Every structure is written in structure tokens, then in C-alpha cells.
Amino acid sequence: MLEISIINALSDNYVYLLRNEQKNLTSVIDPGEAEPVIKFLKSKNWHLDEIINTHHHHDHIGGNNKLLNVYKSKLIAPYYDKKRISNVDMFVSDNETLNIAGVFSKVIHTPGHTLGHVCFYMPEEKCLFSGDTLFYLGCGRVFEGTMDQMWSSLVKLRSLPDDTTVFCGHEYTLSNMKFVNYIDSSNTLLNKVSSDIKEKRKKGLPTVPFNLGIEKKINPFFRADDNSFIESIGLSSNEAPVSFGEIRLKKDSF
Ligand code: ZN
Ligand code: FE
């Protein structure tokens, strides 16, 4: 059983600290900064065994080197990023399995935001670490891949069980929510979720983690192959990757 702590980093990044008490193992996912992680580890008196990166962007790897210096941890990163992330001890690719903090995990390659982006899924813990591929009510901007690739990546994540708990890389929920409410205002489940999100942000609490099953019904980026939804938001039904791209562009200019 893992204890997962959320650490705030930079302006809106989330760093996840995974603690396996039985095995005395601690891992961190996407340390954009080292200091808040070191501070947290010190307060718990934990060593840092592993650092895991979902992709090469600085706000996800910026703390790597300092943490490596302090803890001599093992660094695990996508194979695709081997020229863009340094000091990596173990590269991972699509469909590979590994233990993270002693817990069985699957690597899901999700190109789109970057070409090498990977997500980590823990079936026993029912957890997904989605980096900058899937956000609460949103998805990452498509910087390196194509709209087709990003859509296929989201379809992979959508195929995971409904009772999956998702931990994403940023607190972008409020701005995502504004967009989704604008295009899909009659979605009653969305209305319910929105008041919960507003409540949490008012108290300064993170809106993550979130439930994947609900997300499948309210995240517009998961619904590009639902023709009645596509028509309801004023797009003409089309191939799913095309509709996905149209929603992505709508959001980019919202
Ligand atoms: Zn990124
Ligand atoms: Fe990011």
C-alpha cells in the first residue's frame, strides 16, 4: 500500500512523493524543483530511492540533478528522451513493466505533448500518473506530436478502468473547467464536479487526484469520438482525431 503525498512546485506543478512503508522505499515523480522535495523528505526522515520523469520538460525534471547529488537516487526516464534528460540510470518504453517504490507499474507511451512522454499506471493501487498528457478536465498542449498521436494517447488512457485515480502534472483545473463549462454547460455531472472544484480551490486545496471514470464523461478531449457530443458543441461530426484537434484549438484560443 502506497502513501502518496502531493508537493507543490514552481507556480502550478505537482510533484508526487510515493512512500512504501513496508519496503522502506520512497520515489518521486516529476520533481520540477528539488527544494520542496528535500524539505518534505527531511520532515519525514525518508531517503529518496528513485526519481521518475514522465517527459523532458524543465518543470518536470528541474530538480533531478540536485536530488541525485543529495540522495544518489536511481533516475528512471523515457527512452525517447535519452538525449534530453541526463544522468538516467534506467530508460523505459511503451508496455514495459517496472517497480516504482516497490509497486508493480506499467509504462504507457503517450506521445503528443512531447514525443517521448510516458504515463505510469499501477493496477494494484489503481493509480495513474499522467504527467502533462491528461489533466483534470483537460489535456496537455500538443507541442511535439500530432493531433492524431495525442488522440491515440488519450484513447489508451481512456481504456483504463473507471476506478483509476489520476495524478496529473499541473493544477490547471479551474481554467480547464471554465472552458468545459462554456462548451458543455448542460452536462449535469460536470455541474456537480464544478462546484466541488470551486470549493477546493477556494480553500487553496489541490483538485487532484481525480477519478478516471467520471473524467471519461466530462473531459471533452476524451469525447472526440462521441458524435452527439461533437455536434452539441457546434462542430460537425468527423473523424475522432480531427474533432479532437478542433477541440484542442478551441481551448488554445479560449
Ligand atoms: Zn510538459
Ligand atoms: Fe509541465
Image: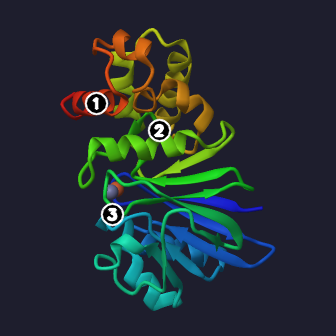
Of labels 2 and 1, the one closer to you: 1
**Residue 123 image-quadrant placement:** bottom right
Q: Position of residue 55 (x, y in %)?
A: 38, 64
Q: Which residue of the protein is positioned furthest toward the right in this rendering?
A: 22
140 is higher (above) or lower (below) than 120: above
Residue on which disc 3 sits: 59
Circle 1: is it few (<14), some (14-19), or many (20+) Cα within 10 Å?
some
220 is higher (above) or lower (below) than 6: above
191 is higher (above) or lower (below) than 96: above
Q: Position of residue 42 (x, y in %)?
A: 58, 78
Q: Amino acid at mark 3?
A: Asp
Image check: 217 left or right of 86?
right
Q: CA–CA distance between discs 3 and 1?
A: 29 Å
Q: Which mark is residue 242?
A: 1
At x 39% / y 87%, what residue is drawn?
Answer: 87
The answer to whether the residue bearing label 3 lies less than 8 angstroms from the nearest atom of ligand 2 is yes
Q: Which mark is residue 136?
A: 2
Q: Position of residue 47 (x, y in %)?
A: 62, 83
Q: Position of residue 13 (x, y in %)?
A: 40, 55
The answer to whether the residue bearing label 2 lies less than 8 angstroms from the nearest atom of ligand 2 is no
In which quadrant is the C terminus drawn? top left
Q: Secondary structure at mark 2?
A: loop
Q: CA–CA distance between discs 3 and 2?
A: 18 Å
Q: Earlier in the sequence, mark 3 or mark 2?
A: 3
The answer to whether residue 97 of the structure is visible from this angle is yes
In which quadrant is the N terminus drawn? bottom right
Q: Nearer the viewer, residue 32 or 118?
A: 118
